[in-house]
Amino acid sequence: MSTRHESIWNGTVEQPSFKPLKEDIEADIVVAGGGIAGITTAFLLSQEGKNVVLLEARTLLSGTSGYTTAKLSAQHYLIYAKLIELYGENIAKLYYEANCNAISSIESWAEARGIDCDFLREDSYVFTKQQEMKSSLEKEAEAYKKLCIDGDVIEGSPAFSDAVASPVMRNQAMFHPGKWLKGLIHEMENAGVRIFENTSLEDVEKTDDKIVCKTGTEHNITCSDLVIATHFPVYAENKFYVNNMSAESSVAMAFKTDKQLPTGMYITAEMPKWTMRNVKVGEESYILVGGESHPTGDGMSEEERYNRTALYAEEHLGLTKPAFRWSTRDYFSPDHIPLVGHLHEDTDHIYVLTGFSKWGLSNSTAGAQIIKDLIMGNDNPYIALYSPQREREEWTASSGENEAVKTYGANKTIENLKNNQAAVIKKDDKDIGVFKDENGELHYIDLSCTHMGCGVKWNDGDLTWDCPCHASRFSATGEVIGGPATEPLEKIDHL
Ligand SMILES: Cc1cc2nc3c(=O)[nH]c(=O)nc-3n(C[C@H](O)[C@H](O)[C@H](O)COP(=O)(O)OP(=O)(O)OC[C@H]3O[C@@H](n4cnc5c(N)ncnc54)[C@H](O)[C@@H]3O)c2cc1C
Ligand code: FES
């Protein structure tokens, strides 16, 4: 069986497509970014009777939301002991509540609107097989007690009887994000939201009472409020986001199988972390295994990461038939609480949702409700918790993930390149990427990222160039496939 190089979510649901912007238009609100953050925000505002436009630079769900593990859980690894340590019990409790309420919102909206998104309530486990990790897991379970979280720490786990400790959080959920967001897109269209794909937000001009959104189509949209949900904010008025966020990528594989994990969602406590859940699409059953977290664009071999993931799945779960494989990235805020609210202190009508720290499905749903309430002038108990202007603490625990080796691809020469491989060569002290495509044609590319000039690194598993600074991704021949960059890498005609 051949493995499809796409996510199980995008590979099993076809999304509707939309034309690019073809004329100058006006709207109450422009939402930029067609992932879960932007789509949920646009949906909620449309339900308030607002005249909303949704802009997507490429196609809806082509960003991280189409490539996730799709756990809808408030169990965000071992976050609660850490949040109590950083900010105290009240803030930790608010964070838990915000995420639980967001999960319940998805459940009730789906039920009310008849959106079948495979929503399933299940318990969520962090587990360890290592005695030395036991105490930190027990500390997390103590945090659950302090915060009255419905959970506990157990020996073993339903899927791994040799686990020595597993904090369990009860009654969490998982779903199919492709089906969920397709449902919301349909609801939005019915409510009159105008959606434009292949239409990127490129710049913003402010007049006294209006905002002019300049797009890559050369047409503008004039609006009263702008929501930037482009994963990494593509517009900002200072270096706050550039200086305060870091990006981490992981790989995932969905294995076709007759067996299923005992009910529950699982993640290991020890490094490297492995995450697992069942997926059922129609009659087909899969187990999704993800892991190999690493700083985006660290230059190590992504192909080896897929190989190690397949090995883990075979050794620990007996899985041998990878049907889908994919990788993606997410942005971390300094304290792992998302940055949602006013873009800057003095930008009244420009809002942002970002920094979801790999737990963006419930967090972005909570965030969309915050943005809707800020624009509508409603109270929301979580505004201060998520505010980008809050006082932030640094999350200092070392991730302990793989050490970056920044030489991958540099050890190849043009002469020994095979098809679909790349080399990095020097010319006039500049790094030049050389990609040999499947027809044997060579493509030469300037490896300076078009966002802020960092050197992009070759990703041999996905055949992309990834930027280590703010995680822009470019195709092997240099086209943008993930922002914040909006311009392709510069092509070089010949050496
Ligand atoms: C491997 C992995 C597994 C994960 N698993 C989980 C999980 O199990 N549970 C969970 O809660 N979270 C998980 N997350 C995190 C979660 O998936 C993300 O936080 C979330 O999907 C981010 O959504 P978003 O809408 O902000 O970004 P995106 O989905 O990336 O959407 C942003 C959109 O903006 C578009 N865009 C970019 N630039 C522009 C522009 N200039 N103009 C217009 N549009 C633009 C992009 O094309 C993209 O479609 C995971 C993350 C990773 C990396
Ligand atoms: S993404 Fe910012 S420099 Fe590349």
Image (spheres, rainbow, N blue to C red):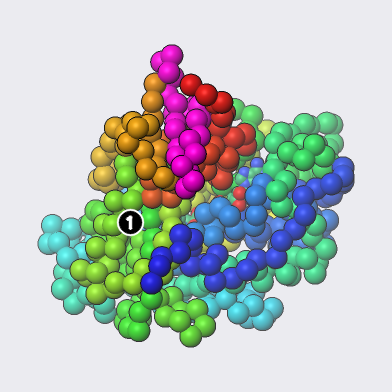
Label 1 crowd (10 A; few <14 / some 14-19 / many >=20): many
Evaluate whether residue 423 shows in this view.
yes
Whether the residue carrying mark 1 lies under 8 Å from ligand 1 is answered with: no
Q: As rendered, which of 30 and 55 lies closer to the eye? A: 55
Residue 200: percent from left, percent from top: 69, 43
> Quadrant location of residue 251?
bottom left
> Quadrant location of residue 185?
bottom right
Residue 334: percent from left, percent from top: 42, 40
Q: Residue 439 magenta-drawn?
A: yes
Q: Which residue is mark 1?
A: 306
Label 1's element?
A: helix
Magenta-drawn segment: 427-455
Residue 376: percent from left, percent from top: 75, 54
- Left or right: 85 as drawn, with respect to 177: left
- Left or right: 55 as drawn, with respect to 150: right
Q: Residue at x 39, y 60 (%)?
A: 252
- Say above or below: 446 vs 3: above
Mark 1 is on which residue type?
Answer: Tyr
Q: As rendered, which of 79 and 402 lies closer to the eye? A: 402
Residue 178: percent from left, percent from top: 58, 67
Q: Residue 175 magenta-drawn?
A: no
